[in-house]
Image (cartoon, rainbow, N blue to C red):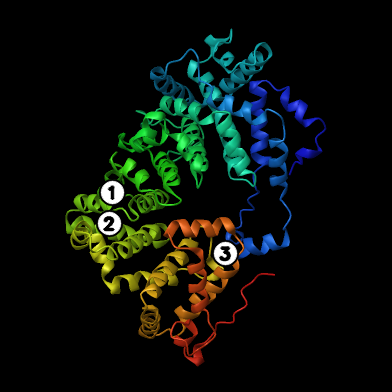
């Protein structure tokens, strides 16, 4: 990987770049500041990542490169200006889509593609010698050679590169510094304007770029939307600056987040858009549960739209389903109004069974909504002096279903059974944490022995004595090693369940107790002949 700090006079060189050169430089940065993906699925496991981090405790080259570019005077400010610059001074957004579709039509003819790209390169070189302004791409003297949309797409691709670089920096070690700089340089107000100009509907034609298949969402417009939504997700994730996404009027009521809530109402939005829209809004809600934020989005019909996509359209995309279930979990958690609206929409047994079927189709994707229901049920059951709470508890199909202990046990069994220390990844570790939430709530009511005994009975019924509990014991040992030294992950756990990390920690400790006479220790429920709780699972 290129070591940016070894390049002589890098700061002065970057400061001398015009807008086009700066955008092209971002293409190089997108590689040099990103962590390398070795492409080996085994290396994506948390076990392997932890072992790798122990071997390499010093900052990676990508992290060093991130620090280097952040120290270039004026660099982030120029990126903010380039990211928020109007796509074209001379083109109205109402004309853009038709021009873009015309451009796709041109590209359907493979014979003209090479010549077309060569002409674009020549014009780009010509414009860069005359002006550093992005709009020069749209006003070149050779303008008549190419469709206007070709030049606009060229500008859009600049923004894709810039937005990607900002996303990477927002997720890096210096994320706090980057947050402050983006707020200082007013990135979000400019992003709000850009958001309003994007076209959030499915194109009227089915053209794809030459060489791509019909299922590929690789158009410049799609790339722009993805990077835009990733930026909003990164900016709002666990950060107080997320309220910069709202304009003054919306802050008074509780912009971009309001507009994102309205986007899903547009007909026939493609799956790629749906995934990133849901991720961006969920990121806004994630953190300490805010009733005001939830109601702000509930009033815009977001819950009903999500349920329509899950139930009525019977969405099959795993990525989209996971993003919807994650968002639904944040939207409904501890919110009585949300459960009332859920019950109003899911008003038949048929709809409810479809919803359950979607949950059960993949608990890796849906376990966050399971966690939300379990936590909310526990909260509501402690508020039965409120007649409104009692009414919802008695009428809501979802809460009534989870109130049955056999259903909670069924989820607990499956959550533990679909993971192991060797297969834990960032994607499925939430299954372990959701199973812990179920047991923490059981412990708070003195019912932990009942749940552990139920797992033991399930093992014997399945004729695999010790299998589930040994696996769970090993998972919890790994949990201790993984979370006890990760402040950010610990905070995420606290926020996701509104349970202090100290209670997570003590619950794991009592479950892992070696005292086989303890009624709350896993080891007490495994017969001696099947006991296998000292497995060495750490990679060397």
Q: Which quadrant: the N terminus?
A: top right
Q: Name above or below for residue 210 compared with residue 89.
A: below
| Quarter residue 27 falls in | top right
From mark 1 to mark 3, how far is it between C-alphas?
A: 34 Å
Residue at image coords 59%, 65%: 484
Mark 1 in CB contact with mark 2 (< 8 angstroms)? yes
Residue at image coords 20%, 61%: 390
Q: Earlier in the sequence, mark 1 or mark 2?
A: 1
Q: Earlier in the sequence, mark 3 or mark 2?
A: 2
For mark 3, give the secondary structure: helix
Q: Name above or below for residue 522 compared with residue 245.
A: below
Q: Earlier in the sequence, mark 1 or mark 3?
A: 1
- Residue 372 % position (x, y): 36, 59
Q: Which residue is mark 1?
A: 307
213 or 442: nearer the eye?
A: 442
Q: Which residue is mark 3?
A: 483
- Residue 157 % position (x, y): 55, 28
- Residue 431 % position (x, y): 45, 64
Residue at image coords 64%, 71%: 538
Residue at image coords 50%, 78%: 510
Q: Which residue is mark 2?
A: 355
From mark 3 to mark 2, how far is it between C-alphas?
A: 33 Å
From mark 1 to mark 2, how far is it between C-alphas?
A: 8 Å
- Residue 337 % position (x, y): 26, 50
């Amino acid at each position: 990987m290129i070591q940016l700090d070894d390049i002589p006079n890098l700061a002065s060189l970057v400061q001398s770049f015009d807008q086009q050169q700066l955008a092209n430089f971002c293409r190089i940065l997108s590689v040099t500041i990103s962590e390398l993906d070795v492409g080996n699925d085994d290396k994506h496991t948390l076990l392997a990542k932890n072992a790798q981090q122990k071997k390499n405790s010093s900052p990676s080259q990508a992290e060093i490169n991130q620090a280097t570019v952040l120290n270039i005077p004026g660099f982030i400010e120029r990126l903010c200006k380039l990211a928020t610059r109007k796509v074209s001074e001379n083109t109205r957004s109402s004309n853009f889509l038709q021009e873009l579709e015309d451009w796709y039509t041109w590209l359907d003819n493979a014979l003209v593609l090479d010549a077309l790209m060569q002409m674009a390169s020549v014009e780009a070189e010509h414009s860069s010698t005359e002006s550093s302004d992005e709009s020069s791409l749209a006003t070149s003297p050779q303008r008549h050679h190419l469709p206007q949309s070709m030049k606009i797409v060229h500008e859009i691709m600049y923004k894709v590169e810039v937005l990607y670089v900002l996303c990477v920096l927002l997720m890096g070690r210096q994320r706090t510094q980057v947050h402050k700089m983006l707020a200082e340089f007013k990135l979000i107000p400019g992003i709000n304007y850009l958001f309003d100009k994007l076209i959030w509907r499915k194109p009227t034609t089915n053209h794809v770029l030459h060489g791509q298949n019909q299922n590929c969402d690789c158009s410049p417009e799609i790339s722009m939307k993805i990077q835009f939504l990733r930026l909003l997700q990164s900016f709002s994730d666990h950060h107080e600056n997320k309220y910069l996404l709202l304009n003054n009027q919306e802050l008074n009521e509780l912009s971009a987040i309001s507009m994102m809530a309205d986007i899903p109402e547009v007909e026939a939005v493609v799956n790629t858009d749906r995934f990133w829209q849901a991720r961006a809004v969920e990121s806004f809600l994630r953190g300490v549960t805010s009733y005001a934020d939830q109601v702000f989005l509930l009033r815009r019909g977001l819950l009903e739209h999500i349920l329509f996509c899950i139930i009525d359209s019977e969405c099959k995309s795993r990525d989209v389903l996971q993003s919807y279930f994650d968002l639904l979990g944040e939207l409904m958690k501890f919110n009585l109004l949300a459960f009332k609206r859920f019950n109003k929409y899911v008003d038949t047994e048929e709809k409810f069974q479809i919803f359950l079927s979607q949950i059960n189709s993949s608990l890796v994707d849906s376990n966050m909504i399971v966690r939300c229901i379990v936590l909310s049920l526990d909260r509501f059951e402690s508020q039965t002096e409120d007649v409104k709470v009692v009414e919802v508890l008695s009428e809501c199909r979802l809460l009534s279903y989870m109130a049955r202990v056999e259903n909670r046990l069924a989820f607990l069994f499956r959550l533990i059974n679909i993971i192991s220390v060797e297969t834990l990844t960032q994607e499925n570790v939430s299954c372990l944490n959701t199973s812990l939430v179920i047991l923490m709530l059981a412990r708070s009511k003195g019912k932990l022995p009942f749940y552990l005994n139920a797992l033991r009975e399930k093992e014997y019924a399945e004729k695999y004595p010790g299998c589930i509990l040994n696996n769970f014991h090993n998972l919890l040992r790994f949990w201790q090693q993984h979370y006890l030294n990760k402040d950010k992950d610990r905070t995420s756990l606290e926020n996701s369940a509104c349970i202090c990390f100290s209670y997570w920690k003590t619950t794991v400790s009592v479950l892992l107790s070696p005292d086989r006479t303890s009624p709350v220790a896993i080891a007490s429920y495994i017969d001696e002949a099947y006991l296998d709780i000292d497995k060495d699972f750490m990679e060397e």
